Image (tube, grey):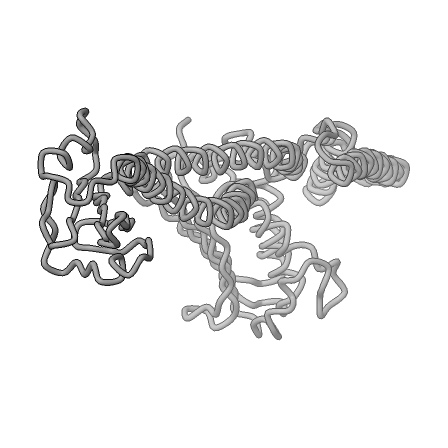
Amino acid sequence: MRRRLILQAAAVTSMVVLAFIVPLAVLVGDFAADRALVGAEREAENIARLMAIQDPAAPSIAELEALLPAEPTPYGISIVTPDGGVVGAELTDSENLDEARSGRAFRAIVPGGQSVYIPVIGSDGATSVIRVFVPTSELRGGVARSWLTLAGLGVTLVSIAMLIADWIGRSIVRPVADLSATAERLGSGDLTARVDPGGPEEIQAVGVEFNRLATQIDRLLVMEREAAADLSHRLRTPLTALRLDAEGLPSGAVTDRLLEDLDALEKTVDYVIDQARSGSKSGLPTSRVDIGSVVADRVAFWRVLAEDQGRDLQSELTNAAAVVAMAEDDASAMLDALLGNVFAHTPEGAPISVTSLIRSDDVLLAVEDGGPGLPDLGVLERGRSHGSSSGLGLDIARRSTEAAGGDFRVGASRRLGGTMIAIRLPLTAD
């Protein structure tokens, strides 16, 4: 915008300057030529006046030469006698004096400039002609300097207009740039970002409304986090009752496993409440985790259920450290979402495969199943599901992957015939 304002001001000012300076430059040239010719006519009239005063019937050459100016002049002055003799500067062959001898004074363009012709009629009726030649250099004397002055004046006016346009542009662009930078900060998660309204009234109004919008967004997010924390806290009561019921069961492997599941569930509820109250965003790469150990842990957790359902849970896991930019809780939630989907949407007995492979700068994770596959890619949309689930599992995994700088792909499993979820996560320093 700033550059456009400057270019627009330069274009408009240039047209105005040209509209005035071009005619003025022509006028300066005409004025200089007219001034030189008027000076030449004055010289010719002075000589004609002297000749009229003397009025000899047949002036000698010496008398005519005495009438010529003693001081050097820029003009070529000639006196042409009635019999055709020339005293002073020579005439060119193209000059015709018949009109002057008829008694008429005039100007004429001749090679190298212009000439002024003034007739002088003696007492005997014979006509002499005074001719004053004005060279082109004299006709254009001072014109180049005047044109340079006008050009400098035009450039100065255009420059001043561009500076004013730049000042106006800065007064508009600066608050807009500040507004854009503040909007970027707000979009990146800085809810304290506010703009100092400035510039024209319209932009100030935009800045005020932007601050009002940011405040409203902050308030709504706080309300949403508190609501999420309250809802999560309401789960504590049924969890406590469920724990008391589980502790009252006879001791055994099933009871121990049930209590372990309740511990994990309580830990998840506490994590949700903590995240909601603190306002932190799941999936942001603020932590580091060995994704290989998380995969191994979650595979071991789900293997028990796989055995109960008669599923063949195959795993090809790397033993080397694979540190990625992801919180441990987020990594566990991502794996649980993927494996939980398999158990929820494939028939019992369908095989499952979990693979992790470390490469030079990233790690590849693949979760495959032998189920019927996805009905359509619409299930990847957040909240959409063809079953009784919430439709959030795949979206949680996708967002966690992208937050860590990775790629999330869904396709068909060639090995098991069902669905394959492929995740690529870039490795990071420990």
Q: Is residue 29 left or right of residue 63?
A: right
At horizontal 41% and vertical 69% (from top left) the residue drawn is 415
Against 220, is 98 above or below? below
Residue 233 drawn at (x, y percent) = 86, 35
Quarter in which the C terminus is drawn: top left
Against 106, is 57 above or below? above
* Nearest to the observer: residue 80 or residue 254: 80
* Nearest to the observer: residue 302 or residue 88: 88
Residue 243 appears in the picture as rendered? no
* Nearest to the observer: residue 298 or residue 92: 92
Q: Is residue 89 left or right of residue 146?
A: left
Numbered marks: total: 0
* Nearest to the observer: residue 163 or residue 106: 106
Q: Is residue 127 left or right of residue 179?
A: left
Residue 43 drawn at (x, y percent) = 29, 36
Residue 10 drawn at (x, y percent) = 50, 43
Residue 353 drawn at (x, y percent) = 47, 58
Residue 307 appears in the picture as rendered? yes
Quarter in which the N terminus is drawn: top right
Against 218, is 107 above or below? below
Give the quarter of the image for residue 323.
Answer: top left
At horizontal 58% and vertical 45% (from top left) the residue drawn is 400
Q: Is residue 244 left or right of residue 190?
A: right
